[in-house]
Image (cartoon, rainbow, N blue to C red):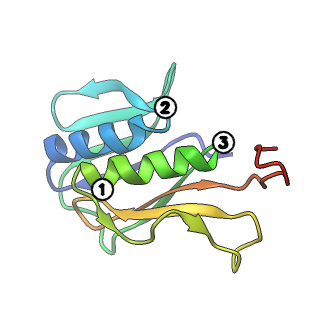
Amino acid sequence: MMDHISLTVSDAVRSKAFYGAALGAIGYRVLREFGADVIGFGVPPKPDFWIRAGQPNQPPIHVAFGVDSREQVDAFYAAAIAAGGRDNGKPGLRPHYHPDYYGAFVFDPDGHNIEAVCHRPLCSCGEKK
């Protein structure tokens, strides 16, 4: 089981704003900061996603955040784009992964591929299982 992940970004202030908006849509918030250059995001009480200022990871990395609903995927994507993220795959089903894989992909300010994904199927009535 993974405890946390961190990535290096070129501008911590810019990335804090981007991730604050994008991840805020799925319930994350800033939980810990060490100066202006190290920021921990998570669902209270523990940060599990960290950014730190420096030379960005090369090649850029892919991080996927699991969420409980397709609406959260949609909200993540809209918030990320509004915060300056670049589209890398609009919200939708990705049946080549599996039939219920619903995800959205954005590039953060440093080109990291950030995703929100829901694996839950829809009932025939339209409600989430």
Asked if residue 107 is positioned above or below residue 17 in the image, the reply reads below
**Mark 3–mark 2 distance (CA, rounded to whole Å):** 11 Å
Residue where numbered disc 3 is placed: 68
Q: Residue at x 31, y 37 (%)?
A: 20
Tag 1–tag 2 contact (CB < 8 Å): no
Extreme-bottom residue of the structure: 96
Question: Which residue is depicted at the point 76% across and 49% down?
Answer: 126
Residue 88 image-quadrant placement: bottom left
- Amino acid identity at mark 3: Asp
Foreground residue, 17 or 8? 17
Residues 59 and 103: in front is 103
Q: Residue furthest front?
A: 125
At mark 2, the secondary structure is: loop
Q: CA distance from mark 1 to mark 2?
A: 17 Å
Q: Amino acid at mark 1?
A: Ile
- x and y percent of residue 101 in the render? 68, 64
Q: Residues within 10 Å of mark 3 (few under 14, many from 20)?
A: some
Q: Residue furthest right?
A: 124
Tag 2: Cα neighbours inside 10 Å, few (<14), some, or many (≥20)?
some
Q: Which residue is mark 1?
A: 81
Q: Which residue is mark 2?
A: 27
Position of residue 117 measured from the top left corner of the image (x, y, whole percent): 59, 56
Query: Is residue 66 toward the left or the right of residue 56 in the image?
Result: right
Q: Say which amino acid is labelled 2.
A: Gly
Q: Is 92 or 9 nearer to us in this picture?
A: 92
- Crowdedness near tag 1: few (<14), some (14–19) or many (≥20) residues, C-alpha within 10 Å: some
Q: Earlier in the sequence, mark 1 or mark 2?
A: 2
Residue 99: x and y, percent? 77, 70
Of helix, strand and loop, which one carries label 3? loop
